[in-house]
Amino acid sequence: MSTSKRRRQRANREARREAEHGIRAVTDADLAQLLADVTVRDDCEHAVTRATADGVVLLRCTVGAAVPGGCPRDCASFERRRVGGLGL
């Protein structure tokens, strides 16, 4: 038996074992936590929005402080958004 065939057979056995465990159900709380952890903070002075042609609104950081997943919770560039430029 060839080495590649043994590898395929081993991979198939492992896949069958993993399939027996099933997939855990995702709850609304899981999704809320995910969205809270990976979005740009909309209360930051450096957050700007842009709408695409298909109507999707994108929120991004103008100083580039956001990591690929979103803003870190303790971002050094965070400044609370001012209302009407009055600093409120």
Image: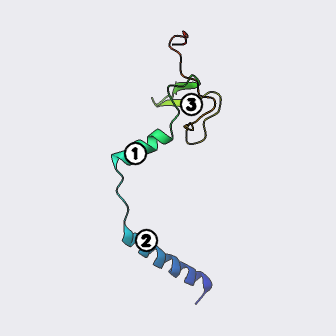
| Mark-to-mark CA distance, 1 and 3 | 20 Å
Quarter that holds the N terminus? bottom right
Coordinates of residue 27 in the picture (x, y in percent): 34, 50
Q: Is residue 25 left or right of residue 57?
A: left
Tell me the SS state at disc 2.
Answer: helix
Q: In the image, what residue occupies the spot 65% across and 32% down?
A: 64
Looking at the picture, which amino acid does disc 1 mark? Answer: Leu
- Disc 2 versus disc 3: distance between alpha carbons? 38 Å
Judging by the rendered image, the residue that carries numbered circle 3 is: 60
Position in image of residue 34 (x %, y %): 45, 44
Q: Earlier in the sequence, mark 1 or mark 2?
A: 2
Nearer to us: label 1 or label 3: 1
Amino acid carrying mark 2 in the image? Glu
Q: Is residue 60 above or below residue 14?
A: above
Badge 3 amino acid: Arg
How far across and down, in percent of the image, does residue 48 sit? 55, 24
> Which of the two discs, 1 and 2, sits closer to the camera?
1
Q: Which residue is mark 1?
A: 31
Measure the C-alpha gap from mark 1 to mark 2: 24 Å
